[in-house]
């Protein structure tokens, strides 16, 4: 388990970047370890002594989806469910990566590095990825083109390719059935949102 100071800092970052619901759901995962959605719901519904209200299922689910989108939470199949069981895709265990949360403190340095080393277009592409998490190349290019009106698709594609070749971003395997590929599995490419290992 992580130290109390790291958990408090991580909870503050979650609240600042994703809101109160994500902070509560992420805080439960940080303090209690991997949990199912039912367990997360049960623990987030408990009063925390600050007069907080129970949080609805939809809000917790949406917070978890946002955290999965940004590579902070990973959903894995529940090992207690048999492989032939039809509910296997529905029952997931959610894990949180505190290093991915703390890495968000370095996003300004990553952006500054991209701007000074690769230019404004690379900065715009990286900013879109940091804001939106996992995204298709087409979406990243469209959003960067909207922000950088003078940019052409071919230029943005070239910048995306350069950032990938330089290791600032990684291609990500698509999520299937809501399960994010495990980063330590060599068959998977990793996360599209940069992490401490990807942005050096």
Image: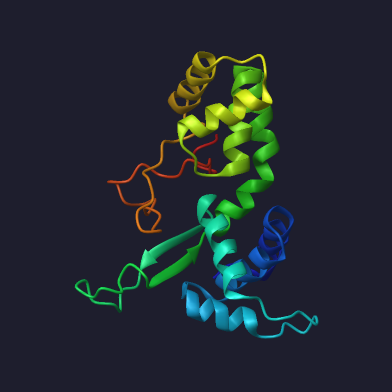
Q: Residue at x 76, y 79 (%)?
A: 52
Q: Nearer the viewer, residue 35 or 148?
A: 148
Residue 120 visible in the snapshot: yes
Q: Nearer the viewer, residue 37 or 193?
A: 37
Q: Residue at x 47, y 72 (%)?
A: 34
Asked whether, in this view, residue 104 is left or right of residue 82, the answer is: right
Q: Residue furthest right?
A: 51
Q: Residue at x 47, y 65 (%)?
A: 95
Q: Where is residue 114 drawn, in percent x and y?
A: 62, 25
Total count of labels: 0
Q: Quadrant of residue 200?
A: top right
Query: Quarter holding the N terminus?
Result: bottom right
Classify 140 as above or below 50.
Answer: above
Q: Where is residue 137 drawn, in percent x and y?
A: 46, 31
Q: Nearer the viewer, residue 137 or 1?
A: 137
Q: Where is residue 111 drawn, in percent x and y?
A: 66, 31
Q: Residue at x 51, y 80 (%)?
A: 39
Q: Quadrant of residue 126?
A: top right
Asked whether, in this view, residue 5 is left or right of residue 36, the answer is: right
Classify 145 as above or below 140.
Answer: above
Q: Where is residue 116 drawn, in percent x and y?
A: 67, 19
**What color scheme is it?**
rainbow
Residue 7 visible in the snapshot: no
């Amino acid at each position: 388990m992580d130290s109390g100071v790291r958990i408090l800092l991580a909870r503050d970052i979650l609240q600042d970047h994703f809101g109160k619901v994500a902070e509560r759901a992420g805080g439960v995962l940080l303090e209690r370890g991997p949990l199912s959605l039912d367990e997360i719901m049960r623990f987030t519904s408990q009063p925390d002594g600050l007069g907080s209200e129970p949080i609805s299922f939809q809000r917790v689910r949406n917070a978890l989806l946002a955290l999965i989108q940004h590579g902070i939470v990973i959903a894995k199949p529940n090992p207690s469910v048999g492989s032939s069981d039809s509910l296997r895709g529905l029952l997931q265990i959610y894990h949180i990566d505190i290093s991915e949360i703390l890495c968000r403190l370095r996003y300004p340095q990553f952006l500054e590095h991209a701007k000074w080393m690769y230019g404004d277009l690379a900065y715009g592409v990286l900013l879109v990825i940091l804001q939106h998490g996992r995204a298709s190349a087409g979406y990243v290019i469209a959003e960067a083109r909207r922000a950088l009106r003078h940019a052409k698709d071919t230029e943005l594609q070239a910048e995306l390719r350069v950032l990938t070749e330089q290791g600032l971003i990684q291609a990500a395997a698509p999520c299937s059935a809501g399960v994010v590929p495990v980063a330590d599995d060599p068959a998977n490419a990793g996360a599209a949102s940069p992490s401490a290992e990807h942005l050096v």
